[in-house]
Amino acid sequence: MDNQNLEKEIKKEVKMETEAIREANWLLPASILAAALLIAGAVIYSTGVKSQPVKQAAQTGGTAAQTADVQLDDNDVVLGNPNAPVTIVEFGDFQCPFCSKFFKETESLIQKNYIDAGKVKMVFKTLAILGGESTNAGLADYCAKDQNKFWEFHDAIYNTEYDELQKYIAGQGPSSENNGNLNRTLFKKIATDLKMDTTAFLSCYDSKKYQKALDANLQQAQSIMGSVSTPTLFINGKEIQGAQPYSVFSGAIDQLLK
């Protein structure tokens, strides 16, 4: 199959997957999920990480039984009440399509119903597993942390990537991954829009100040997951893989709040 036909097949599978998610409340039949992951693993989602298998988690029917002790560090920024009884830790890649879907379609509801209510706090740990642009975005977001703009910067990147994904699905643009859009120019624009000190921000970004933080996130993810997937979330240590429907997360949170 030539490259043009292969690209058409990939887009066809992505569209089929998206329609199935919407029609079945995000619960994919096993056959569709297997086909989507097969194509993703073979064509779209290969990375340079060699020490552990790497994948992107799609929607699955349930949650993993694994429970892990996810340690926070000085680079982690808490969203919400620091004393909230439930903690959500997300390991995500800014280029991961399912991560942007989770951000846009599920995380917003979690924030509205639980984080803003003081019941849940959330931490995002960047996993740069999909290439150089993932690393760029992770470094930029950590530099935004220095000016107390971590979450605003996080949201701006994911909004950008979600829009790119929708264009790709509609056949109006290239893949949302490694297409060149997550670059210094974009990050400077976001910093400007957020009224940050762009000189200090770019100095931080250009120096790769937070590369060790990204490396530490990957090491931690490998130690607690084995096979690194994005998005993977831990709710008080209980692992949930993939951009699950909101009901999966609300059910897990409500059980912990009882």
Image (cartoon, rainbow, N blue to C red):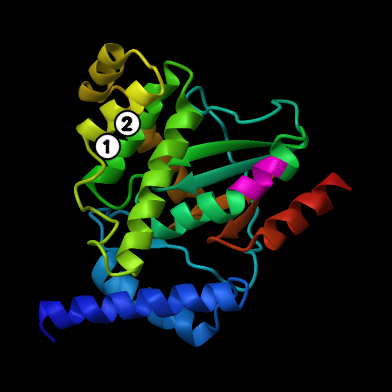
Q: Is residue 51 left or right of residue 31?
A: left
Up the image or down, 71 lies above or below 1; here it is above
Q: In this view of the protein, which residue sits in the foreground, 148 or 241? A: 148
Q: Residues within 10 Å of mark 1 (few under 14, many from 20)?
A: many
| Residue at the farthest right position | 258
Q: Is residue 231 left or right of residue 65?
A: left
Is residue 185 something one can see in this rendering? yes
Q: Amino acid at mark 2?
A: Leu
Asked if residue 150 lies in the magenta stretch, the reply is: no
Q: Look at the picture and state if 212 lies above or below 238.
A: above
Q: Quadrant of residue 241?
A: bottom right
Q: Could you tell me which quadrant the N terminus lies in?
A: bottom left
Q: What span is colored magenta in the figure?
A: 108-112
Classify mark 2: helix, strand or loop: helix
Q: Position of residue 124 (x, y in %)?
A: 51, 38
Residue 244 location (% of width, % of height): 59, 63
Marks 2 and 1 in Cβ contact (< 8 Å): yes
Q: Judge from the rendering whether residue 134 lies leftward or rightward of residue 242; answer left or right.
A: left
Identify the residue at image location x=29%, y=31%. 187
Q: Is 94 placed left or right of 199 in the picture? A: right
Q: Which mark is residue 194?
A: none
For residue 139, which numbered disc appears in the image?
A: 2
Q: How would you classify the magenta stretch by its main secondary structure?
A: helix
Quadrant in the picture for residue 204: top left
| Residue drawn at x 49%, y 57% as measured from the top left | 101
Residue 133: x %, y % from top left: 25, 44
Above or below 222: residue 156: above
Q: Report the Cα–Cα distance between label 2 and label 1.
A: 5 Å
Q: Nearer the viewer, residue 162 or 82?
A: 162
Read off the residue under disc 1: 136
| Amino acid type indicated by mark 1 | Asn
Label 1: state its secondary structure: helix
